[in-house]
Image (cartoon, rainbow, N blue to C red):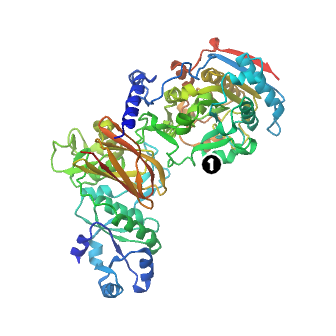
Amino acid sequence: MHRRSFVRLLAAGAAYARAPVAGAAQKAEGLPPLRVVSKYSAAKVPGMPGPYPGRVVSVKSDKVVDTTTGKADDAIVREMMAQGIRRLTNAATTADAWRRFFEPSDVVGIKVNCGGFPHCISAYEIVAEVVRQLTGIGVPVTQIFVYERFQNQMDECNYAAHLPSGVQSVAAERANRNADNSGYDPATYLEADLFGEEDTRSNMMRLVSQRLTKIINIPNMKDHGATGVTGCLKNIVYARLSNVARTHSRGKSHTYSVVGALAAMEPLRSKTVLQVMDGLRGVWHGGPFARTTRYVFYPREIMFATDPVAIDRLLLDIIENERRAHGAISIWDRSPASLKIDNNRARDADPNVNIIIREPGHVEYASTLGLGVYDLKKIKVERLTV
Amino acid sequence: MTALVVLALSLPCVYWTGGTESRATLEGAGITRICVAPGRADSWRAAGFTVTPLTDAELAARERLPSPGTTPRPGVASPTRAPWIDANGWRVTRHPTTKYVYDVPAGNAALAAAEIVAYGADAVLKIDPADAATLGRMLAFLAALPPADLPPVADVGIVDDGSAITGEVMNLLSRRNLLFQVVQAPSPRLPITIRIGAPEYPREEAADPSAFAQKIRRQVTDERRALRVYGSEVVICRLTAAGGRARVHLLNYGGREIEGLRIRVQGTYTDGEAHVAGTGRLALEDRVVAGDATEFTIPRITTYAIVDLRTAR
């Protein structure tokens, strides 16, 4: 045995003892026991909820997206981004605002969402503006990584065509086929037996645990068949860890506790310093996918925060209200009558069909792990218009 | 004739139905030892091959094994997302002295050959000639493996009543890499002995072999299992070990290469390496000893690999 391995093992054991997810407590609540193994300790101020817990800046513009074509206006996006980040940080200039989070030596990951291709992915305009601001404050392009979990999704979205040469586009796996594990860190994982599956580990991307020093999360405003919505929390964890589709099966989802537990894992929690919720476009049903425009809507909004729970709390209402406007069942619906297990076709055809009982409560559960503020009365939303 | 097959137990005998005019196919694949119908034996010998004559009756007397691999089963409910696997290791473990025959379609010969060697089966392999080259490479790999004569390791013992239901339990235990050994009676070396029909293992429960295997898993506990696999649900293993040495056989039924397969084996091993079909010798990565177990990553696995582990003395 290598001494280094042994030391690492001890560290992993110690991290487990300190882990924020207490298996015994979860058992008591009827939730599956979850075991976190990580050698990483938390930063003094973990990125989530970061320096601005319970604070969200929302910037809207009626003109930012042409709803007849779906095309976004690059100049308006830039202005929305500038005003949002300045207001969040109370910085005098946009560059100063970005400097609050990043410095030139950082290796920055931009977590995009490609699952809603082609109609609702992290907007090219937003991603490009983030890169422009990072390079503007001195982060070299070679230290900027745009990433997702699956390479085939990254290829579809092709962010590289919209970004300066040198920005890295990376993925952990070639495709969703459970055969590429080399992009994951074998020593950093969550272990849980959820449905009797044999592979009980979900490992963190090596890029996240070993290479990046800071992460920006750019989710979309989307409905999700298992979690109710896929916002900051879901986007941040399900694309950074392996073997996570196992959390929902045969109509039941364990996402209620697993999403928060994964988001609380170190070093993910400490490194994720900025949430930019892309609400230029949204999906009110059939998410996380958007293969047709049938369920696409246009909030024309970008939210800024360091607190993922606060944004996601607002997102729950945004998606719920949009569904209500279309006469669709609530994301909180748990009725067996609405459930057609694993029948994606029925779900896609009818917004009153669930394929899994959704767990929008995962957002509140995440707040109990210290990831942010869930109580609407305690969330301060500052609204700007461009 | 039979003796010749037994002598060559370590590798499968390829049953070849073609005449010597097809010799180029075998020579090109590097296959020099074949089983043929007695009437063709002399001509193949004259062509320079090592031949074991096998009559139709002898062939028919062998137990036919299904072709190994994964099978799509649309519409069939499953308690997990794991694909359905047709694997034969449990059959050989149950009946180690039985003589078997595979008749595999194109694409499956290499996996069948690996299965035969991993479980030490006495098996004849009928193949699609299109597989000759792939099979030849696998046979060459198998022949070059370092020798290791180690006893199998088991998590549980199972008393075989010969019933189909017990067979399905063995199948599902094997499918989960819950290693079993057929025993006549409870053994002090094994923490659990299953006898279907006993009060703690009622036949009604075993009628759902998947749930039953899950129950056994809970009894053994994941922590104490001899072997775990992370990163795939289509790799089935056999573990042999003694005296500070262990060999893990890994059979990949999924039909595609797997990168970064993580393995956990009970016991403290300080050194080891993998031998991967189609790749050769590979160093193990990210090895750690956690409690009473050793974990490591195999960088890639094709159809078959072995991992040899050692403890420094």
Q: Chain of mark 1?
A: A
Camera-nearest residue between A162 and B237: A162
Residue A230 in view (yes/no): no
Q: Which percent across, then down, holds residue B289?
A: 34, 38
Q: Nearer the viewer, residue A152 or A319?
A: A152
**Up-down: is B234 above or below A313?**
below
Q: Can the viewer see residue A42 in this picture?
A: yes
**On screen, B263 above or below A105?**
below
**Between B31 and B62, which is closer to the camera in this rendering?**
B31
The quadrant of the image that shows the C terminus of chain A is top right
Q: How many marks?
A: 1
Q: Position of residue A12 (x, y in %)?
A: 41, 30
Farthest-out residue, top: A377
Q: Does residue B250 appear to the left or right of A226 in the view shown?
A: left
**What type is the residue that disc 1 sits on?**
Asn
Q: Quadrant of residue A154?
A: top right
| Disc 1 residue crowd, few under 14, some 14–19, many 20+, Cα 10 Å | some
Q: Relative to B58, is A308 on the left or the right? A: right
Q: Which quarter of the figure is the N terminus of chain A placed in?
A: top left
Q: Quadrant of residue B141?
A: bottom left
- Return the x and y of residue A2 as percentages of the image width and height: 36, 40
- Dot 1 corresponds to which residue? A152
Residue A363 horizontal/vertical position (percent): 57, 24
Q: Is residue A272 above or below residue B283?
A: above
User: Is B200 positioned to the left or the right of B28 in the image?
Assistant: left
**Residue A173 in the figure: left or right of residue B185:** right
In the foreground, B229 or A323: B229
SS type, badge 1: helix
